[in-house]
Image (tube, grey):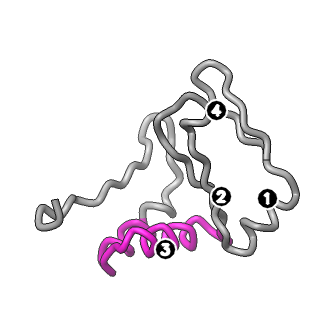
């Protein structure tokens, strides 16, 4: 994998082995601190947006209802005028 930074843009170049790894269901995690950032990026793949939404919800420990909302939102094509952003409510019990 190639990792680079150009201004505010982070560039990640995937090699064929990276693609195979993603296809096997192995996400790629990149620590952006290595590129001067304070965040992490995770790259993964799925057959459909809905399948990826289910993977994401499962990894986050979402409830069945939250998962179905996320899957429904994943099926909506975002536009510049109306981007689709889903943020589940935080459970104050776990704060």
Residue 54: image tag: 3
Q: Which residue is mark 2?
A: 28
Q: Position of residue 40 (x, y in %)?
A: 52, 46
Looking at the image, tell me whether mark 2 or mark 1 is earlier in sequence order.
1
Q: Which residue is mark 1?
A: 18
Looking at the image, tell me whether mark 3 or mark 1 is earlier in sequence order.
1
In-front residue for pair 66/28 = 28
Badge 2 vs badge 1, beta-carbon distance below 8 Å: yes
Quadrant into which the C terminus falls: bottom left
Q: Which residue is mark 4?
A: 10
Asked if residue 79 is positioned above or below residue 58 in the image, the reply reads: above
Real-space CA distance between mark 3 and mark 1, rounded to the nearest whole angstrom:
22 Å
Looking at the image, tell me whether mark 2 or mark 3 is earlier in sequence order.
2
The question of residue 59 being in magenta is answered with yes
**Number of the front mark, 3 or 1:** 1
Residue for point 66% across, 64% down: 45
Looking at the image, tell me whether mark 3 or mark 4 is earlier in sequence order.
4
The question of residue 45 being in magenta is answered with no
Real-space CA distance between mark 4 and mark 1, rounded to the nearest whole angstrom:
17 Å
Q: Main secondary structure of the magenta part?
A: helix
**Number of the front mark, 3 or 4:** 4
Find the magenta span and give its range. Answer: 46-72
Asked if residue 49 is positioned above or below residue 43 in the image, the reply reads: below
**Number of the front mark, 2 or 3:** 2
């Amino acid at each position: 994998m190639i990792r680079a930074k150009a201004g505010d843009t982070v560039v990640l170049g995937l090699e064929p082995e990276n693609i195979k790894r993603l296809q096997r269901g192995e996400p790629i995690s990149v620590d952006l601190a290595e590129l001067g950032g304070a965040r992490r990026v995770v790259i993964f793949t799925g057959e459909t947006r809905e399948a990826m939404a289910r993977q994401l919800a499962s990894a986050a420990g979402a409830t069945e209802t939250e998962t179905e909302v996320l899957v429904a939102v994943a099926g909506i094509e975002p536009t510049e005028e109306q981007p689709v952003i889903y943020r589940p409510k935080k459970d104050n019990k776990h704060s």
